[in-house]
Image: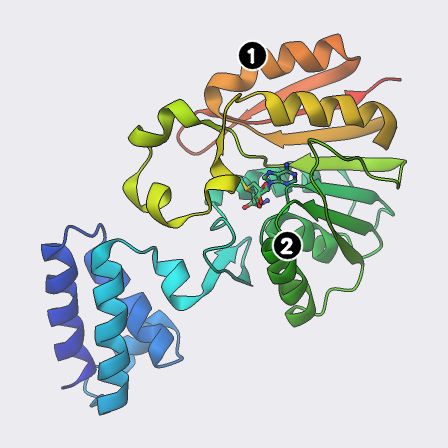
Amino acid sequence: MTVIETLKLAAQYLEKHEIENARLNAELLLADILNCKRLELYTNFDKPLKEEELQKYREFLLRRAKGEPLQYITGKANFYGIEFLVTPDVLIPRPETELLVEEILKKYDKSSHLKILDVCSGSGNIGITLAIKFPNSKVLCVDVSEKAISIAIENATRLNVRNISFMQLDILKETIQEKNFDVIVSNPPYISVNKKETTQREVRLYEPQIALFVDDELKFYKRIIDLSDDLLKENGSLFFEIDHELAQPISTIMDSKNFKQIKIKKDYADLNRIISGVKTK
Ligand SMILES: C[S@@+](CC[C@H](N)C(=O)[O-])C[C@H]1O[C@@H](n2cnc3c(N)ncnc32)[C@H](O)[C@@H]1O
């Protein structure tokens, strides 16, 4: 079987199992097995596949047809043009979250010496990207999941990022000894458990529940805003990813806690997605 013949059958198989963008998925899975870029498949259409490659591809296709996210099958996800290792212990980084990084990049010069705190860091996608983009800055990533912290450390090591450290802690119960952060950034869990059944099946069944669902959607925001009192410098900035429905209540809480210059940024679907503010005292 050649690359082109295999791809055609694989795309038909995924389509039959109602996988969106079946052809793209088929190409990305095969490119991962052949250890090449997706577009390189096009210059190797007539290349015959080895039996072990086909065997692995069949396994990958079976998993994908059942609904397992592509990134958990390949073990990799792209965030801000950087490749991160991911396992089912961490949330798959989302394109909307790149806006959080973008907002911080817009506000500060790349040569700044910042102290940055990433709360609920998961795979380390936000913190590591910021550590790379602000090489003179220091980033601290915290997450309650030991396994997530291990993956984040592995990502930082693979990417040779040294201006970063990691700490496992429960932000709802504990605090951080270090103070005087210039920036606190967080994409915390924010989907109400009441919305679990209506959440996309792939997300609900495969991604870590602890990364997604909360009994009170505002819980993490309230806690991080309260902690900012102690952790954030005067004139330091807070950046959150939010559900679009939470923009108003979070803005009100930030305003009541002496945050000024509160800005809400929309995502690609024109929904409120990022909120930021500056601590005044
Ligand atoms: C929505 S995910 C965000 C992951 C990553 N920052 C991203 O943007 O893709 C939320 C993260 O919060 C972590 N988390 C959940 N409860 C926590 C808690 N009480 N304290 C600290 N981290 C927590 C989860 O382990 C998960 O990694």
Name the residue nearer the viewer: 70 or 110. 70
Left or right: 28, with 2 as reference point:
right
Left or right: 159, with 200 as reference point:
right
Q: Residues within 10 Å of mark 2 (few under 14, many from 20)?
A: some
Residue for point 12% across, 78% down: 5
What coloring was used for the rendering?
rainbow
Q: Is residue 114 visible?
A: yes
Q: Amino acid at mark 1?
A: Gln
Q: Which residue is mark 2?
A: 146
Q: Is residue 233 visible?
A: no
What quarter of the picture does the N terminus occupy?
bottom left
Q: Position of residue 58 (x, y in %)?
A: 21, 74
Question: In which quarter of the view is residue 158 placed?
Answer: bottom right
Please tell me the numbered disc located at residue 151.
none
60 versus 111 height, above or below? below
Q: Position of residue 113 (x, y in %)?
A: 87, 47
243 versus 26 height, above or below? above
Left or right: 43, with 124 as reference point:
left
Name the residue nearer the viewer: 54 or 261. 54
**Real-space Cα separation, disc 2 to disc 1, in angstroms:** 33 Å
Residue extending farthest front: 173
Mark 2 residue element: helix
Residue for point 39% across, 30% down: 269
What quarter of the picture does the C terminus occupy?
top right
Residue for point 52% across, 22% down: 217
Q: Which residue is mark 1?
A: 248
The earlier-in-sequence mark between 2 and 1 is 2
Name the residue nearer the viewer: 2 or 111. 2
Q: Residues within 10 Å of mark 1 (few under 14, many from 20)?
A: few
